[in-house]
């Protein structure tokens, strides 16, 4: 894990890929818990028997479940010390190129795209890519905006 000491160190690293998280298995229990928390009980996520005969051959993780893993996975790749706050501001773009079948292992990669200084600190744009072990296409590509308050 890389730990930056302040906005200047982050600015110097713009344009670099920072590495990957560990692999994490996406279990049916995690999918079911997400369905319970969000109320999204679509059969392709929560009905293993029906999903086995469906288009993916098994249940798949919700796209938003995959997206929700970004904070935890991203926190194992890098952190920023020397700022008062780091606030998630939003996203410029999110895509789900491939489904995540139950039992898959996924990991997250992070690349610092840009940093725009503001009167209170900076806005950091990071591209996160969640890969599926053994798959050609990623499960998720998301460009996030984080406000760094100096």
Image: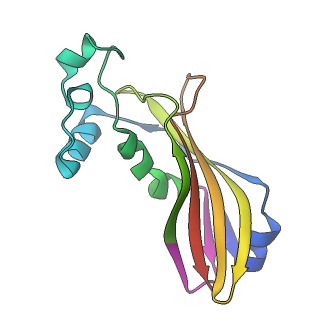
Q: Quadrant of residue 149?
A: bottom right
Residue at the farthest right position: 12
**Residue at the image point whose x is 54% and y is 44% from the top:** 22
- Screen quadrant of the N terminus: bottom right
x and y percent of residue 93 in the render? 56, 50
Residue 28 sits above or below residue 89 on the image: above
Magenta segment, which residues? 76-87
Q: Quadrant of residue 79?
A: bottom right
Q: 26 above or below 48? A: below
Q: Is 49 one of the magenta-colored residues?
A: no
- Is residue 58 in view? yes
Task: Give the camera-side residue of 78 and 145.
Answer: 145
Residue 86, given in percent of the width and then of the height, sits at 54, 76
Q: Position of residue 13 (x, y in %)?
A: 79, 64
Above or below, comparing residue 62 to residue 81 in the picture: above
Q: Is residue 107 left or right of residue 115?
A: left
Q: Quadrant of residue 10?
A: bottom right
- Answer left or right for 102 relative to 142: left
- Image quarter hosting the C terminus: bottom right
Q: Exactly how many numbered labels are in the figure?
A: 0
Question: Taking 103 as reference, is 93 above or below it?
Answer: below
Which residue sits at x=59%, y=49%? Answer: 128
Considering every residue shown, the one lying at the far top of the view is 53
Q: Is residue 1 something one can see in this rendering?
A: no
Lateral position of residue 22 relative to residue 112, left or right? left
The spot of residue 5 in percent (x, y) is 70, 77
In this orientation, which residue lies closer to the viewer: 138 or 133?
A: 138
Q: Residue at x 60, y 78 (%)?
A: 148
Residue 83 shown in magenta: yes
Q: What colour scheme has been applied to the protein in the rendered image?
A: rainbow
Looking at the image, which residue is at 53% across and 58% down? 91
């Amino acid at each position: 894990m890389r730990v930056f000491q302040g906005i200047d160190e982050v600015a110097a690293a713009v344009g670099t890929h920072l590495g990957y998280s560990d692999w994490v298995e996406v279990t049916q229990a995690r999918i079911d818990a997400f369905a319970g928390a969000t109320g999204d009980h679509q059969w392709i996520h929560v009905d293993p028997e029906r999903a086995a005969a469906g288009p993916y051959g098994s249940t798949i993780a919700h796209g938003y479940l995959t997206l929700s893993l970004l904070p935890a996975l991203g926190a194992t790749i890098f952190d920023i010390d020397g700022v008062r706050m780091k606030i998630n501001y939003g996203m410029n773009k999110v895509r789900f190129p491939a489904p995540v079948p139950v039992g898959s292992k996924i990991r997250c990669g992070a690349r610092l795209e840009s940093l725009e200084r503001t009167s209170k600190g900076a806005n950091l744009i990071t591209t996160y890519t969640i890969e599926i072990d053994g798959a050609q296409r990623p499960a998720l590509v998301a460009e996030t905006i984080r406000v760094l308050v100096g």
